[in-house]
Image: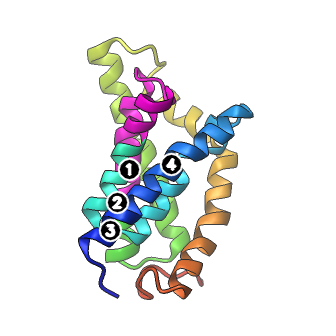
Amino acid sequence: MKRNYIQEMVLASMFIAIGIALPMIFHSFGLGSTFLPMHIPVLIAAFTLGFPYAVAVGMLTPLLSSLITGMPPLFPVMPYMIFELGAYAAMGYYLGQKLKLNMYLALIGCMITGRLVAGAAVWVLVLFFGAKFQGPVVFIISAVTTGLPGIIIQLLFIPPVILLLKKANVIKSEVCHVEK
């Protein structure tokens, strides 16, 4: 199914809106950095939108959320999240839509790539902008351990959503596959 740019923009806007609203709900219960709610719509966008739209969702969601809600904080969190979620979207598109990997492998590949890119961004923020992080390796280990519940939710929630979107003919049937 071929979509036009208007459909892509509408879906991208919807994912950005969800990416702003969902963290507000989770943060009201103090669960934002544990359950990683902003990552969910970005990862779904990566598997459903064209490359530029998916990456735009990944990079604009933390920026707009920071400007509208104050979450994530403008500095130092928002800058690394722009790169992390942009990497999620780019890698999700590549692994899921271009290579058509198994959904779980594609998700894990996205998560690893995003964390590595976030670590590199943290290194730049510490080195050049005086951000108060312990360093990229400690940051990555901490991000994975703190976000483990969110990672599990992503692995459990996103593949069925992608499957439902395939059945509803919202995305191409050849995008990723959920079976073994």
How far, Cα to Cα, is label 4 from label 2? Answer: 13 Å
For disc 1, the neighbor class at 10 Å (few under 14, some 14 to 19, many from 20) is many
Q: Nearer the viewer, mark 4 or mark 1?
A: 4
Instruction: Tell which circle, 4 or 2, labels the residue nearer the N-terminal end.
Output: 4
Type of amino acid at the residue the image marks with label 3: Glu
Residue 156 in the image: x percent, y percent? 67, 65
Residue 82 lies in the magenta stretch: yes
SS of the residue under disc 2: helix
Which secondary structure, mark 1? helix
- Residues under labels 4 and 1: Cα distance? 9 Å
**Disc 4 target residue:** 19
Q: Which residue is mark 1?
A: 58
Q: Nearer the viewer, residue 98 or 14?
A: 14
- Res. 54 mark: 2
Q: Quadrant of residue 145?
A: top right
- Contact between marks 4 and 2 (CB within 8 A): the answer is no
